Each structure stands twice: as C-alpha cells, then as structure tokens.
Image (spheres, rainbow, N blue to C red):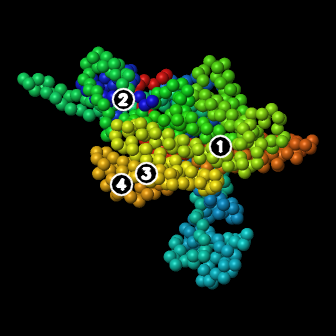
Amino acid sequence: MIVPMKKLTLLVLESEKEKALKKLRKVGVVHVEKQEANSETLTELNQIKSNFELCENLLADAMPKAVKKQKTLTPLLSEGATFDLVDEVLSLNERKTRLRESLNKLNNLLERYKEWGDFDPTDLDFLSENGVYLFPAKMEEKKYKKLNGEIRTLKLKSAKKQAYFLVWHDAAELPVDFDTNIELLPKPEKRISSLSEDYVNAQKEIDKIELRMAELSKNLNSVKAVYKINASRLEFESIRAGMPEVGVAESTKNFAEVKLAWLTGFIPSTEVEKIESASKENGWGFALSEPTEEDNVPTQLKNNKFVSIINPLFDFLDTRPGYFEVDVSFWFLMFFGVFVAMIFGDAAYGSLILIAVLFGIIKAKRAGKEIGNSLWLGLFLGSLITVWGVMTCSWFGIAPELLPDVLKTFAIKGISSLVPSAVRNRNIMLISFSLGLAHLSLAHFISLVKNIKSPRFLSDVGSILMLIPMFFVVLNMVIDPVKYQLNNTMFISLGIGFILNFMFANYTTSLGNSIIESLKNIVNMLLGVVNVFSDIMSYIRLWAVGLAGAAISMTVNTMCGPMLGKALLIGLGVLIFVFGHGLNIIMAVLSVLVHAVRLNNLEFSSHLGLTWSGFRYMPFAETEK
C-alpha cells in the first residue's frame, strides 16, 4: 500500500532555525520540500562533495586486487586526516594529468625526430645568429625529388619512403606561400637525447604517483565515511539556506518586527504525533493539510514481508507509483514471477539459482546478518523457474528420452517436451495470450474499482469488453482459425466496449464534455482498438524468448555431447557445456529486464493508467554512524 501523507508547514523563529532544524532532524520523519538555496557554506559543501566523489573514484580505480580482497577494513582516519588525504589524492591526480599531457607532447616530438639522431636545436640557433636559417622538414621521397629548384634544401637521409631534410632560407620566417607539400617540423626545445630523458623521468614519476595512489586506496572507507558526513551537512545547509523568511509585527503597540522562517514537507499520517509533540516542546508553529494533486508528494510503500521482496527490483529500476496512483506491488510480483519462469524455462537453471540463493541465505545467517529482500526474491523466482521447468520437462535442454523417468513423472504433457513441438508451442502460446488477457483485464478491474464512484468506471468496463474479443482474434490468427472461430457475439462485445470507452474515457464533470474530448482525439481512440490487439499479441514474447533459450541449450548440448564421450575431449566438452549454459543464463537475465519488466511497466501500466512517476520518501533524518 501507499502510505497516506500529510502536508506540513512548519514556522520557526528565524534566529532559531538552525537549532530547529537540528531538532527536526532528530525527529526524522519529515520529507522536506527543497527550495532554491544559495550560500557560501552551500557552495563550499558542494565543492567538498565533488572533491570527495572524484577522490573516491580515483582510489577505487587505483586499488590493487589484494586490497579489494581484504576482509578486514583499514581503521578509519580522523575527519581532518581524511581531508588531507583527499587533498593529496587530488594533487597527485592533477600532477599525473599534467605529466600525461607532457608525455603525449614528448612522444609526438620524439616520433617526429626519431630518424634525425641526437638532433640539437642549439646548432640551428647558432647558425641563425650568423644569418643562416635552417628549418627541419620532411616529405614523401618521390615529391622531394620533384621539388622546385628555387627551394634550397640539405637532405639528411631517406627512410620509409620519406625524405628528411633542412630548408635553407635567407630570412627568419618562411614566406606565406611556401610549398604546402613540405611538412615543417616544430623545433624542439632541447636536444633529442634530453627529451628522451625527460620522457623516461616523467614516466617514472607517473609510476611513483600510481604506487602512492595504490597505497592510499586502503583508506577508501575513510573517504566514504566522511563523504556521508558531508552529505548530511550539505542536506542540512540546503534546507537551512532555502527556508524563506517573513517579518511579522510582534504587537500592535510598538510594531516591533519579528523574523520567522518556514518550510514545507510531507510526513506519513502515522507520524503526525511526533511532529505535534516536537512542535509543542520547541514552540514551533505548524499546519497540517491533505496533499493535493498539485503537490509533489513522495511515495512510501508499505507492504507485508512477502510482497516487500519486490522492492529491490523497484529500487534497481528506480521506479515507484506516484502518490495519487495505485500500488500494484503484489500483482507486479505475481506476474513478474510467472514471466521470469517462462523466460528462463529450465528446471536446471532454476535449481542452480536456488542453490546460489540458499548458499547466500546460509552465509548471511552464519554471519548473524538479516536476510535481505534480494535473497528472498531470488528464492521466489528460482522456485518458480524450477516449477515451470519441471512442468515442461526442461533440464539443461536435454532431450526427454535421455532423462530419467522420475523427471518425466511431474511433467504436464501438453506443454512439455514429451509431446511434438507443434503441440507444445500452440499450448504455451495459448498460456501466454491467456496471461495477457488476465493481466490486462486485471489492470482495468483495478482502475474500475478506483473510479467506481465516477461514471468513468464504465470506460474500464468497455476496455474489458474489447479485450475479450481481441483475445479470440489473436487466437484465431496465431493458434488455430478453426478452433477459435470469430462470431457475432465477439463483434458486438467489441462494439459496445468501444462505445463505452469512447463515451467515458475522458469523463471529468459531464458526459457531453467527455464525448467532445473523445471526438477531439478520434484518431487516438480508433488506434486504441488496434493497441488492444497489439498489447495482447505482445505477450507472445513469453513463448518466443523461452523457445529461443531452449534452442540455445540444445545447440550447446549438440556441440559438447560428442566430446563428453571421448576421454581426450571431455575437458573441452565440459568447458563448452559450462560456458554455453552460463551464457544462456546471462541472456535470460537480460531478457527478464527487457521483457518481463516491460509487460508490467508498459502494457499493464498503460492499461491501468499507471505512470510510475513517484519518487522515494526520504525523511530529513540523522545519518547512521
């Protein structure tokens, strides 16, 4: 469920707003609406945040594998020492950047002069002082031979079809219209041997910097800890600096002005007493009201332990329903689980997931840690994948005749590999489309219940009446036109459904206005009928992706099967088996993110009118140390 919120307006003395914010943070229940803020402290804290983020990334990249594998953390540095550490890391990184730029320049210069030997530019300077101006250059050998005789050159050597030479001129600068085929080389600042030494020294200094960064990386936990402290300070200052101020008359006699500061935010209805108590204790003024649709209200989801296992997926996708929308966590979890099972489609894969999850649960229990929702979600999905794989008699894609009889006992013939593929495919497609009908009908039923007090609910009735005949249209076209023949009842249902949807889809105040709005969007309303068909058809992906995974499994088995029977090739066969099926599992995970999530977040949600526009309830509270 979505926890009901109250909108809070809190009024405090301007002179006490910092003190008030500290106490409000201790209460820890108000999601504060951030206002535009500006202060020197805020600018400084934002700079610290940027510095720490850069430092954290640099140390993470520099951390040796041995340090990453260490189970014991390095003791935390003091806050002051951590700031010094960050300054050193940023200074080292800045120096390293400059050295890299210098290396690139030196490398380009050395590359250009590698055929010139230990070239010394001071020789050219000496000649210039005596009126002889020479310019290092190169060009293609064949073009050099065709040079105009007016251009005086001193050829040094030829190498790799290039001619290296000096251009001899009477002035310190060459004319603007000088031959463009000649590539003039930039004169180095030092002799080439000195530049080579500079290159080596710069590389050595970079190596020392990298060693120092690797050494400092053991203190990454200190950087993260102080970063959290700074984040708390930043949040505090952004709220403090953003609190609007207002002046009021203290009394009618002297009209002395008292400055007040205020903020707005949202609190769960169950936490109102905490704010009331804190306000009375500290002399704050406050007002509570019901949020309106114009308010930017955070969403706090509160479900039972079973439904809450879907939360890690919501967090990963960074999606949650808007405050004024419907919480579909339970239905999302149920259908998502079924979709995942059909996409993986293999009992052996499900068993491997279960083993990995159970290992994680046992490890967490031994360490005395709480078992997270991610592990419970993995257990739930692994169980469903295994059950579906058992029902379809799918075990690493192995042919059913090679499987033990006990594994065939629990298979459901119509959808398992024990029947011809044509029969199995038709039945699984039927299940896929039936799931689509149930899923989309459920969306409209939920919307119907939500709108039951408004005639708009008839629009959802109409949508359900359109879904049913379109379901049979899909079956007629894809599965069996003889078995699933269309009749007049279906067309009547489709027509009535369209009329109801047309009349009430845009209902707000009156039927007339709703019809006018529908007429304005007549093209979209007509396309909506096609969308109903395409949305049901979209569920064929459950069969198609599962079939593709099964085909890959069989291909892997075909490749490694002959090798497993030969002593010399058994190692290679096992390697192909593990790699092939491992890759298939990874592809199944990606398919889950693309298809199983899509059917919930797109098809189901669009029929329900769910935009997933919500954002997390994040109360202004003290950070855990």
- Residue at the spot x=33%, y=47% of the render? 507
**Is residue 361 toward the left or the right of residue 30 in the image?**
right
- Residue at the spot x=30%, y=19% of the render? 276
Q: Nearer the viewer, residue 112 or 588?
A: 588
Q: Residue 542's x, y, as percent? A: 63, 46
Earlier sequence position, callout 2 versus callout 4: 2
Q: Nearer the viewer, residue 415 or 334?
A: 415
Mark 2 or 1, which is nearer the eye?
1
Residue 179, disc: none
The image quadrant that residue 568 belongs to is: top right
Earlier sequence position, callout 1 versus callout 4: 1
Residue 496, disc: 3
Mark 3 or 1, which is nearer the eye?
3
Q: Residue 188's x, y, as percent? A: 59, 60
Residue 5, disc: 2
Q: Nearer the viewer, residue 349 or 79?
A: 349
Mark 2 or 4, which is nearer the eye?
4
Per the model, the C-alpha gap separating discs 3 and 2 is: 40 Å
- Residue at the spot x=36%, y=48% of the render? 504
User: For numbered disc 1, what is the local secondary structure?
Assistant: helix
User: For numbered disc 3, what is the local secondary structure?
Assistant: helix
- Residue to which mark 1 is pinned: 343
Q: Residue 326's x, y, as percent? A: 43, 36
Amino acid of disc 4: Ser
Per the model, the C-alpha gap separating discs 3 and 1 is: 36 Å
